[in-house]
């Protein structure tokens, strides 16, 4: 009996993290192939073209990373469809009205922008961002990305790919194995660890928990994707605007943003979603 229980636990753990493992392996392979092909193509072009590519190296690198993300999630699409279908079956309840959907969208946009920018300002004001050289390098690289390309990468490709892995698959599986609250925390921590440095780990962990809570509360995969996209775009756009950046990155700006974020979380908790809570429904079924 104990051996069977250990095997079941190992299976549940592996089934939970396997989407991340598969995604990361395919992503790395795709990125390596794309970088190699791009390097060979550039080597056959003239010196002027090579010089131009060097001046846009950050944009090109991030673009190849975004394409690799798309390739990385392709093997996960069938599993995502099954998980989303199972979640729809479990939640039951009526469908939200058009007014409820609009309220949810506005709430998520307010929460995403205020929390995303607010956390970034807080980390900057406390000096926390200075402790990680890896973060400094990544931030500098993202700052060098052309705005149009960055908007597509950070506002569409990265959010969709990462939400498929962390909320669509990992969170949905975790909540069945260990309950909704634990799933929110663990999936958020995994999202933070995935970013690979302390600064983004702390930021990603907090935002990951918020996105998991958004998904749990509103019970539609659309909303964490919207949250992720809006937060990314707000942070990226602010970094590109030096004048606005100087005004927002103040103690007063930080306090205002985080106050709005708290108010938005409270608003989110009061929204009528039209469905019974997934966590409650799972608990009822297990009794």
Image (spheres, helix red, strand yellow):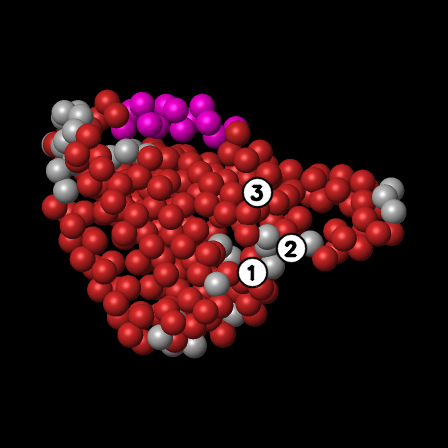
**Residue situated in front as seen by the camera: 41 or 240:** 240
Whether label 1 touches label 3, CB < 8 Å: no
- The mark nearer the N terminus, 1 or 3, is 3
The residue located at (66%, 48%) in the rendering is 60
Alpha carbon of mark 1 to alpha carbon of mark 3: how far? 15 Å
Quadrant that contains the C terminus: top left
Whether label 1 touches label 2, CB < 8 Å: yes
Dot 1: element: helix
Query: Where does the image place residue 234, in percent across and percent down from the top left?
Result: 40, 55
In the rendered view, would you say 96 is above or below 127?
above
**Pointer 2: what residue?**
58
Q: Neighbour class for label 2 at 10 Å: few (<14), some, many (≥20)?
A: some
- The mark nearer the N terminus, 1 or 2, is 2
Mark 1 or mark 3, whichever is nearer to me: 1
Q: In this image, 96 relative to 115: left or right? A: left
**Pointer 3: what residue?**
66
Instruction: Inspect the magenta stretch and tell me whether residue 109 lies in it.
Output: no
Instruction: Inspect the magenta stretch and tell me whether residue 85 lies in it.
Output: yes
Judged from this view, the residue extending furthest toward the front is 243
Alpha carbon of mark 3 to alpha carbon of mark 2: how far? 12 Å
**Residue situated in front as seen by the camera: 109 or 30:** 109
Q: Which residues are the magenta region?
A: 75-87
**Pointer 1: what residue?**
143
Q: Neighbour class for label 1 at 10 Å: few (<14), some, many (≥20)?
A: some
The residue located at (44%, 61%) in the rendering is 238
């Amino acid at each position: 009996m104990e051996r069977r229980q250990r095997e079941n636990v190992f299976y549940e753990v592996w089934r939970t993290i396997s989407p991340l493992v598969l995604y990361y392996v395919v992503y790395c392979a795709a990125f390596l192939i794309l970088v190699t092909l791009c390097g060979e193509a550039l080597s056959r072009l003239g010196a002027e073209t090579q010089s131009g590519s060097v001046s846009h190296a950050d944009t090109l690198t991030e673009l190849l990373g975004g394409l690799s993300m798309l390739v990385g999630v392709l093997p996960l699409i069938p599993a995502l469809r099954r998980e989303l279908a199972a979640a729809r079956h479990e939640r039951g309840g009526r469908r939200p009205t058009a007014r409820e959907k609009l309220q949810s969208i506005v709430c998520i946009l307010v929460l995403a922008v205020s929390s995303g920018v607010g956390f970034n300002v807080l980390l900057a004001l406390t000096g926390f961002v200075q402790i990680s050289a890896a973060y400094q390098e990544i931030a500098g690289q993202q700052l060098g990305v052309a705005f149009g390309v960055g908007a597509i990468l950070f506002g569409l490709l990265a959010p969709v790919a990462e939400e498929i892995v962390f909320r669509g698959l990992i969170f949905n599986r975790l909540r069945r194995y260990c309950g909704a609250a634990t799933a929110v925390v663990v999936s958020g921590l995994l999202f933070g660890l995935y970013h690979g440095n302390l600064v983004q780990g702390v930021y990603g962990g907090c935002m990951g928990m918020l996105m998991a809570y958004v998904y749990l509360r509103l019970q539609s995969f659309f909303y964490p994707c919207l949250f992720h996209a809006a937060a990314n775009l707000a942070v990226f756009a602010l970094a590109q605007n030096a004048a606005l950046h100087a005004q927002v990155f103040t103690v007063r700006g930080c306090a205002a943003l985080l106050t709005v974020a708290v108010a938005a979380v409270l608003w989110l908790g009061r929204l009528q979603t039209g469905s019974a809570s997934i966590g409650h429904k799972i608990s009822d079924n297990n009794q």
